[in-house]
Amino acid sequence: MNHRLTIAAIAAALAACPAQADDIVVRGQALSKEEAAAQAKAFVQSIGIVTTVKPAARWLDPVCPKVSGLGDPTVAARVEARFRSIASAIGARLAKPGCKTNLLIGFTEDADALARQINANDPRQMIELSNAWRGRLVNGRTPVRWWYSTEVRSADGQPPINAPLPWMSFTAEGGAEGGGGSSTNTDVGGDSGGGYTNSRRSNLVSNNAKRAIRTATVLVDVALAQGKDLDGVIDYAALVGLAEIRFSGEPPANSVLALFAPDNPVYGLTTQDEALLKALYRLPLDRQGRYHRGWLVNGVTKALSGQE
């Protein structure tokens, strides 16, 4: 018997289930403050959402999701509704129906082939990806794969221009910025999303720039996703669609990102997943990466230890 999960099977399974778009299941248990802090730090570090140099990014424009590949518009609408429910719950802005798509969630029976086709037809879509990440997209065996385009805007939200990135400043003498010597700015290339517009505001705390997600593409390989809870797959797509996640190696535990790991007990968004997203959409974006990392770790720590 052929047990391959097809698009038609997904559509039939979703259509047969009662609508649950507003029922976001978050699983987890309270930890001690020390345990929570250690888990939160490891989680934030493992998913590549922020580095010492690179600040975090999020959607600044309203998110306009589109679901493709499911054939039945009723089923696609349900998937979009669950995504919108998650986005609304964590504080992301949502565009109205009929908007111009900037986030695509595509269901396909061959994600490798589709990713290769997209890369061949319009390589600019993957211009920000490292060679290793692009290789995993077009030759991988992961059930869900994704990529983004980003840009750097001013603290006032103005469109980007060619200008040095403020968080890439260092002194010619080799010391920390502000510690003497002349200051130099270094652009980090495609991954940076380009330059930024200088803000009219002057602030000793703000770096006068924000990293914004412009577009995101999430592909679900239904053959590789066989046997997994469909709402869990949507939750996975929502997490990587709403935050700039770039992890390598094993997926982090206690996260929907481990949905496809062997013997994994996670079935959807977890406490730390939801806490990460909420913290991301609350933090001031015009800050250094180290500030963002601390903010995210603190938000996840509070949730895991039952303080929120």
Image (cartoon, rainbow, N blue to C red):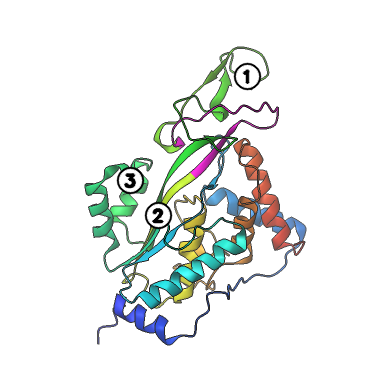
Position of residue 96 measured from the top left corner of the image (x, y, whole percent) = 49, 60
Of badges 2 and 3, the one in the foreground is 2
Residue 251 appearing in the image: no
Which residue is the site of mark 3?
Answer: 125
Secondary structure under badge 1?
loop
In 3D space, how far apart are the residues under numbered discs 2 and 3 (Cα atoms)?
Answer: 17 Å
Q: Is residue 128 magenta?
A: no
Position of residue 307 measured from the top left corner of the image (x, y, whole percent) = 77, 61
Which residue is the site of mark 2?
Answer: 100
Position of residue 179 measured from the top left corner of the image (x, y, whole percent) = 68, 18
48 relative to 109, above or below: above
Query: In the rendered view, does 135 fall on the left or right side of 192?
Result: left
In 3D space, how far apart are the residues under numbered discs 1 and 2 (Cα atoms)?
Answer: 46 Å
The secondary structure that most of the magenta stretch takes on is loop
Query: In the rendered view, does 144 fall on the left or right side of 254?
Result: left
Badge 2 crowding class, 10 Å Cα cut-off, few under 14, some 14 to 19, many 20 or more, is: few
Secondary structure under badge 2?
loop
Amino acid identity at mark 2: Lys
Of badges 1 and 2, the one in the foreground is 2
Amino acid identity at mark 1: Gly
Of badges 1 and 3, the one in the foreground is 3
Which residue shows up at 62% across the image and 35% down it?
A: 288
Secondary structure under badge 3?
helix
Q: Quadrant of the N terminus?
A: bottom left
Badge 1 crowding class, 10 Å Cα cut-off, few under 14, some 14 to 19, many 20 or more, is: few
Nearer-the-camera pick, 54 or 1? 54
Q: For the magenta stretch, what is the residue range?
A: 192-212
In 3D space, how far apart are the residues under numbered discs 1 and 3 (Cα atoms)?
Answer: 37 Å
24 relative to 111, above or below: below
Which residue is the site of mark 1?
Answer: 175
